[in-house]
Amino acid sequence: MVEAYRIIVLARADVDLAEIYSYIEQDSPQSAAAVVRKVTAAIESLSQLPRRYRVHEHRSDPAKIVHSVPVPPYVIYYRVDDASRVVRVLTIRHGARRQPKRFG
């Protein structure tokens, strides 16, 4: 069995998830919890085969390539570091919002 990648959720993505919850909670606390569970499950699934999702931003340095995974209506943006077997979740955005043009 292949060793799983370690998931690191960066501070920006953590804030994004909290904001998603707070926004949905205003109308429905149950729905807010369900959406956060769905997004969190998608993030956790990146520990296995993280490169299976589309490349959002190409870079010459493979460690700087940004992938995106849709979790309708949200999109999770992340980088994969194969050398250290780490997935870094950068941000989570609503699909209707303008998507990031650059990542740090």
Image (cartoon, helix red, strand yellow):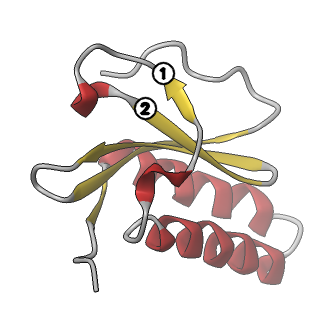
The secondary element bearing badge 1 is classed as strand
| Residue 76 in the image, given as x and y percentages of width and height | 56, 47
In the drawing, what numbered circle is on residue 66?
2
Residue type at the position of mark 2: Val
Q: Residue at x 82, y 32 (%)?
A: 96
- Give the image quarter of residue 94: top right
Against 45, residue 75 (above or below) is above
Kindly check if marks 1 and 2 are in contact, taking CB atoms under 8 A apart as contact. yes
Against 1, residue 86 (above or below) is above
Q: How many marks?
A: 2
Residue type at the position of mark 1: Glu
In the drawing, what numbered circle is on residue 84?
none
| Residue 50 in the image, given as x and y percentages of width and height | 43, 57
Residue with the most extreme left position: 84
- Is 41 positioned to the left or the right of 26 in the image? left
Q: Which residue is mark 1?
A: 57
Q: Residue at x 73, y 55 (%)?
A: 23
